Image (spheres, grey):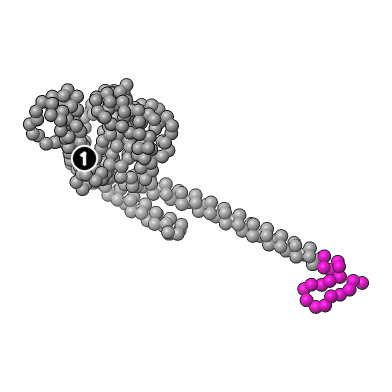
Amino acid sequence: MAPTARKEALEAKLQQILKLKEEVKAEISADSESEGNVSAVSAPRATGLSDKCIVTFADGREIKVIIGTSEHIQEPLVDQICRIVDEAYSKVGKHKRVDRYDAVDRLEMGDAGPQANRVLHLAFKGDELVGCASSTFSPGWTPEGCGHWGLLAVDPSHQNSGVATALVIAAERRLATISGAIQIEFQYTEGDAFSQRLRKWYEEKLGFAGDHYPLRPGQTVFRRCRKRISESDQQKGHLRRLEEIENWLKSEMTKEAEAATVAKAMDEEDDMADIADMESESSAEETEARSAMHTGEQTGGGYPVKAA
């Protein structure tokens, strides 16, 4: 697509997104007035878009959760991701590894911005990486419209401090921008203390529901659980999605403008170079003509003339 045509297409899409934003805002406002704005005071509060979500707890603690991109492919950070996943799962007797190649691949997926399917969320306390999790709109093994999060890992030295909660909130807020439901899976062993604690957190606190059938003590199964995303959260998610697309369009328009400026500068440089070449050629012709006159020869037509 030609630069001008792409710029016009981006501008047209931006106007469409801005119009949709106002419509969704009006719907959310109307629903809030009819239902009343009731929220748990003690519940963590999340602000921001998918690429940078700030989760604030009732006691004032904040955990920043961002979406990793190729900008985060740095020697210490990649190693920390691998270490946190290894140590978090090994601590509870699980075998889960992320090597450097996998970590880099997951980070690069975030470069697609709003168009990304799977991303890696990174949780920070200040500048310290303390956990990670993945979220995927369409993993390939869930029903249509059902997103998924997994690879939830918290640095053992920061567990039980809200990091896992912040990661889940960030992942589910992102999924709510497109999905209508969420699926998770985990390995469960009947009678195992850790399995029971994990199941209670997933299926009671987080609201997931799985199959219920009797198990023998020590029997291990792979539990698949799902939950619906409320209409209200889907509406708010839709609005955030539009804001994310708006930001992406504006970023692309800025890139187009910068590229046009560079192209114009290069054209001007080429024009100046052409003018310089023409002046050089003209100067050479004048020098040649003067030389010919000096030796008594006229080269532009007519007959040679002897010098006086």
The three-letter code of the residue at mark 1 reads: Ile
State the residue lying farthest toward the bottom. 302
Residue 66 in view, yes or no: no
Q: Would residue 176 appear left or right of 217 to someone viewing this image?
A: right
State whether residue 234 is above or below residue 53.
below
State the residue lying farthest toward the top. 157
Instruction: State which region is magenta.
Output: 291-308
Q: Which part of the image, by quadrant, shows the C terminus?
A: bottom right
Seen at 60% across and 57% down, the residue is: 270
Quarter location, residue 157: top left
Q: Would residue 30 appear left or right of 296 to someone viewing this image?
A: left
State whether residue 216 is above or below residue 3.
above
Q: How many marks?
A: 1
Residue 304 in view, yes or no: yes
Crowding at dot 1, Cα within 10 Å, few <14 / some 14-19 / many 20+, comes out as: many
Check residue 220 for magenta coloring: no
Seen at 42% across and 49% down, the residue is: 252
State the residue lying farthest toward the right. 308
Q: Position of residue 182 (x, y in %)?
A: 21, 40
Check residue 296 for magenta coloring: yes
Foreground residue among 301 and 78:
78
Q: Secondary structure at mark 1?
A: strand
Foreground residue among 212 and 111:
212
List the residue tagged with mark 1: 182
Magenta stretch: helix, strand or loop mostly? loop
Seen at 31% across and 32% down, the residue is: 97
Q: Position of residue 170 (x, y in %)?
A: 29, 35
